[in-house]
């Protein structure tokens, strides 16, 4: 098919011609405009205020001339701004160079124009003399040099201020971007850690359902399927609730233990002891799940003796202590993952990573062995207000 020469693609509706200010001030527009007009506006007010204590002839004409001269200074400062942004990718050294020789040249031009504007006692709004040839021999060059130094000091000071503020703004922008990336990474990390589900648990639960069906224990099989479905739903579809109450967390763990007790009805026993005031305390969802899994895995599966699991929650001062105790003894896993044996320390690392991502150094996981032959894992959490909002 031949293209239709009369057809022209429509312009992108989102593409708009940059405004005049955007073209004049392509970088740090607000900062440049406010600083330039702020510096020379202050200078204009200061120079004009002299009329309050110094009598000046033809003050109205001088006021108009001062407006004209201030506009010229703003224009030259804009030229300096363009010079600075033209070398912004070349490092601070190039920017500092622009504040030396080029700025001196601009200051000298301003001083010469100042001499031209104010060297005539013109009437109000009379600018005809500006169109006449300039007689440089009549200039007061001492005044020009003095004025050039003053203008250079103002231009260089503005340039240094602009560079400092623009650098600070760039740093703040990078920090905001870094915090946004950190929040995304932290959210992804927490979600990945939370969704780590032991596949053996699901396989064993389904195997238990199969055994119950074979033994025609349909009611127990149905209850186990319902409990497993509720548990899986809470784990896999509860992503919107990264923080839940202690009451919700314990209810979830009880559901998990009930599923496991269907496999070991005679050997698994658990007890829950929660301080009533702690029920509404917000904690990370499924934070004690690895502790319960470890207790069942190494307690019930690793021996033929009955296993007691005790879950207790207490408020101590401004801290929440969640303890999971079970029969047996705990070994502190090595710090280096390469030194761990299979099946040791993964769940504890999961907890430590989540606590570090959420609370920094304000939360901890403690492991201990009691004198009565129980292994105790304790999670100590600070007040929920200490959860990181930003990093």
Image (tube, helix red, strand yellow):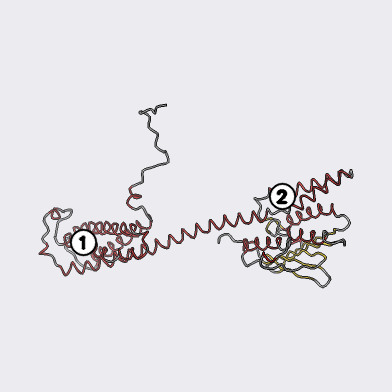
Outermost residue on the bottom side: it is: 371
Would you say the residues marked 2 and 1 are in contact, meaning their CB atoms lie under 8 Å apart? Answer: no
Residue at left 75%, top 48%? 230
In the rendered image, residue 125, in percent from the top left (x then y), is placed at 18, 53
In the rendered image, residue 134, in percent from the top left (x then y), is placed at 12, 58
- Find the distance from the CA under tag 2 to the CA under tag 1: 74 Å
Mark 2 lies on residue: 234
Mark 1 lies on residue: 109
Outermost residue on the top side: it is: 1
Quarter occupied by residue 146: bottom left
Position of 179 with respect to 128 (left or right) is right
Label whose residue precedes the other's in the sequence (2 or 1): 1
Q: Specify the label residue 52 is tagged with.
A: none
At mark 2, the secondary structure is helix
Position of 9 with respect to 49 (left or right) is right
Quarter occupied by residue 343: bottom right
């Amino acid at each position: 098919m031949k293209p239709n020469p009369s057809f022209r693609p429509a312009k992108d509706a989102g593409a708009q011609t940059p405004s005049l200010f955007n073209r004049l001030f392509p970088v740090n527009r607000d900062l440049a405009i406010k600083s330039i007009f702020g510096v020379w506006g202050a200078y204009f007010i200061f120079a004009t205020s002299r009329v309050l204590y110094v009598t000046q002839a033809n003050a109205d004409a001088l006021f108009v001339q001062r407006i004209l001269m201030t506009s010229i200074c703003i224009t030259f400062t804009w030229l300096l701004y363009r010079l600075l942004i033209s070398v912004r990718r070349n490092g601070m050294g190039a920017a500092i160079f622009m504040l030396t020789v080029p700025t001196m040249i601009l200051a000298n031009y301003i001083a010469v124009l100042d001499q031209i504007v104010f060297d005539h006692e013109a009437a109000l709004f009379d600018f005809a003399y500006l169109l006449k040839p300039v007689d440089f021999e009549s200039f007061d060059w001492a005044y020009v040099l003095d004025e050039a130094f003053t203008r250079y000091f103002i231009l260089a000071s503005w340039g240094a201020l602009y560079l400092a503020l623009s650098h600070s703004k760039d740093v703040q922008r990078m920090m905001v971007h870094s915090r946004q990336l950190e929040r995304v990474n932290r959210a992804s990390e927490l979600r990945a850690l939370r969704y780590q589900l032991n596949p053996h648990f699901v396989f064993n639960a389904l195997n238990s359902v199969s055994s119950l069906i074979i033994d025609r224990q349909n009611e127990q099989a149905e209850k186990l399927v319902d409990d497993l479905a509720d548990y899986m739903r809470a784990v896999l579809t509860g992503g919107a609730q990264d923080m839940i109450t202690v009451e919700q967390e314990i209810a979830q763990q009880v559901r998990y233990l009930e599923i496991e007790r269907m496999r070991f009805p005679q050997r698994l026993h658990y007890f829950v002891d929660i301080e009533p005031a702690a029920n509404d305390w917000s904690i990370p969802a499924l934070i004690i799940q690895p502790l319960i899994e470890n207790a069942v895995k190494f307690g019930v599966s690793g021996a033929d003796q009955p296993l007691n699991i005790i879950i207790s929650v207490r408020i101590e001062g401004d801290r929440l202590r969640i303890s999971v105790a079970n029969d047996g003894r705990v070994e502190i896993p090595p710090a280096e993952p390469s030194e761990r044996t299979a099946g040791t320390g993964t769940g504890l690392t999961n907890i430590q990573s989540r606590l570090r991502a959420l609370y920094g150094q304000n939360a901890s996981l403690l492991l201990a062995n009691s004198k009565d032959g129980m292994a105790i894992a304790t999670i100590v959490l600070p007040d929920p207000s200490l959860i990181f909002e930003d990093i």
